[in-house]
Image (spheres, grey):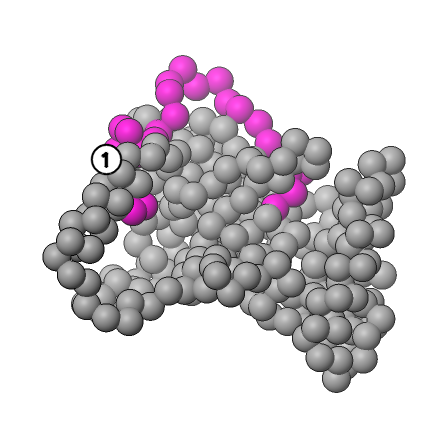
Amino acid sequence: MPIPSTAADAAALLGVGLTADRDTIRDRYRRLARIYHPDANPDDDAAGARMLELNAAVDLLLGSDTPTLDEAFAPQPTARALTRREQRRERSIREALQHLPYGVYVIGTVTSEGTPNAMVADWVMQVSFKPRILCVSFERDAASLRNLRETRQLTVNLLPESGMDLAARFLQPTNPSKIEGRSAKFAAPDKMRGVAYQQLEHPSLEGGAPVLEDSLAWIAAEAQQFIPIGEHILALCRVFDGDALPIDEGPLTSLYTGWHYGG
């Protein structure tokens, strides 16, 4: 069965009714995942495709409320003003977390119309060998997250240290209202203009996410699950291609740029 694009298709794939409650959908998804997960079928090349279909189905029916959502990880609003002691502790925690080093990654995505886009992300890491899975953290209102939900494909481009100016091109959000006080004149609807890139062809999906020609290394992956965590969404993506280019430089990281996204 192809990846479902409607709620009716998703319900049929999971074997539940369109009016099934959320607990029934979650339970059915877990049962099928235990049967079809690639880890349980290491010799079945089609297992990954089945899981992609299941993940897409449950994502359609439940939206961001996936079966792995734990209420403990919901966004935590501040209910009261902090005492001075609590404020000092908050500053200490923030400063400690900002010492964690991160790569400066350009995340390439493509819209459902085939238009490439890119953003800078810090919270990216490999979380599995077999299969190779990347975890990428997005703000919930990120345009790149919307693209990824629609097309299921991204690239992770790691820049060399000389690529700081290139990285800066992608710092401005597509929607300027995300930054308080910004007006529409700061919009960045076409971040790829003037950037050398190629759109990578996915083996089974239409369109292609951009690979920057000036990257130190790049990885292409297909999104298989979205997990809400606080004010962010984690995208678990299965790697299907990648390469390291012969550039005699170290990677661009927060240790070099001094940019911090943490705390």
Residue 164 x/y as whole percent:
29, 34
Please indicate whether residue 254 sits to the left or right of residue 38 in the image: left
Q: Nearer the viewer, residue 133 or 20?
A: 20
Q: Residue at x 60, y 32 (%)?
A: 242
**Residue drawn at point x = 55 percent, y = 36 percent:** 126
Task: Judge whether 260 appears above or below 13 on screen.
Answer: above
Tell me the SS state at disc 1: loop
Q: Which residue is outermost to the bottom?
A: 19
> Residue 255 in magenta?
yes
Q: Which residue is nearer to you in this view: 167 or 60?
A: 60
Q: Residue furthest left?
A: 84
Residue lying furthest top: 248
Please provide percent x and percent y for residue 207.
63, 53
| Occupied quadrant, residue 182 | bottom left
Q: Is residue 47 visible?
A: yes
Compared to residue 261, the image places residue 173 above or below, namely below
The answer to whether residue 140 is seen in the rendering is no
The residue located at (31%, 65%) in the rendering is: 178
- Is 13 displayed left or right of 86 in the figure? right
Q: Is residue 188 left or right of residue 70?
A: left
Residue in the picture at 27% in, 28% down = 256
Instruction: Please state the extent of the stretch shown in magenta in the rendering.
Output: 237-263
Identify the residue position indicated by label 1 in the image.
258
**Residue 212 image position (x, y, % from top left):** 47, 37
Residue 231 coordinates in the image, percent (x, y): 41, 61
Q: Amino acid at mark 1?
A: Gly
Few, some or many residues within 10 Å of mark 1 (<14, 14–19, 20+): few
On screen, residue 75 above or below 41: below
Q: Quadrant of the N terminus?
A: bottom right
Whether the magenta-drawn stretch holds residue 40 is answered as: no
The quarter of the picture where residue 83 lies is bottom left
